[in-house]
């Protein structure tokens, strides 16, 4: 979520730099890499086919003929507050990475109370459990 916000604000350089230095799960050309690549490719086929069907059904229609539905629900103010808390938790922006980095030691533990050492999912879970923080 933070990465998307940065991109929308026109600050995508750090995402690109972090991606270049990201740890790789597999060596390119290894059997594990080929398996993971095939799995990712196969996993995208059903959603792509569904979107192709949607595209065909919308062909020739104007924006007035297309019914849009709101798929989001919730409290806008609470969402903004939660997002601001997330942004505040990564205030040490230079120490924040979008991807695990090469040579980086994992310092996060499930019980970590220091926001600079928590993973994004730990931060989100903490905010859900303690909204007053």
Image (cartoon, rainbow, N blue to C red):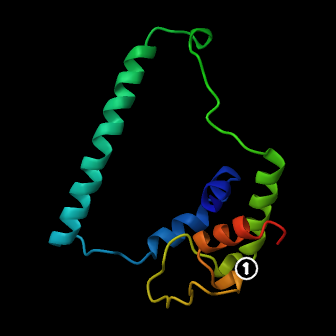
Query: Does residue 39 lie above or below 92 as drawn?
Result: above
Q: Quadrant of residue 109?
A: bottom right
Which of these two is toward me, 81 or 96? 81
Q: In the image, residue 120 lies at what x, y percent?
A: 60, 70
Rendered-image quadrant of the N terminus? bottom right
Q: Secondary structure at mark 1?
A: loop
Q: Quadrant of residue 85?
A: bottom right
Q: In the image, residue 69 lies at what x, y percent?
A: 61, 25
Q: In the image, residue 117 lies at what x, y percent?
A: 63, 85
Q: In the image, residue 52 lies at what x, y percent?
A: 35, 26
Query: Does residue 45 lie above or below 41 as drawn?
Result: above
The structure residue drawn at horizontal position 26% and vertical position 50%, both measured from the top left corner, is 41
Query: Does residue 122 lie above or below 110 as drawn?
Result: above
The structure residue drawn at horizontal position 74% and vertical position 74%, both measured from the top left corner, is 89
The structure residue drawn at horizontal position 48% and vertical position 80%, both measured from the top left corner, is 101
Q: Mark 1 — residue?
A: 92
The structure residue drawn at horizontal position 45% and vertical position 15%, both measured from the top left corner, is 58
Q: Residue furthest front?
A: 129
Query: Does residue 126 lie above or below 109 as drawn?
Result: above
Q: Quadrant of residue 119?
A: bottom right
Rendered-image quadrant of the C terminus? bottom right
Q: Is residue 66 left or right of residue 9?
A: left
Which of these two is toward me, 20 or 31? 31
């Amino acid at each position: 979520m933070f990465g998307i916000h940065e991109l929308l604000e026109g600050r995508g350089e750090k995402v690109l730099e972090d991606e270049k230095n990201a740890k790789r799960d597999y060596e390119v050309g290894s059997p594990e890499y080929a398996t993971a690549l095939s799995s990712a490719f196969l996993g995208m086929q059903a959603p792509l086919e569904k979107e192709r069907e949607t595209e065909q059904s919308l062909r020739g229609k104007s924006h007035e003929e297309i019914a849009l539905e709101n798929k989001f629900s919730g409290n806008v103010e609470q969402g903004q507050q939660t997002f601001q808390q997330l942004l505040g938790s990564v205030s040490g922006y230079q120490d924040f990475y979008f991807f695990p980095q090469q040579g980086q030691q994992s310092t996060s533990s499930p019980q970590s109370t220091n926001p600079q050492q928590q993973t994004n999912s730990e931060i989100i879970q903490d905010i859900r459990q303690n909204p007053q923080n």
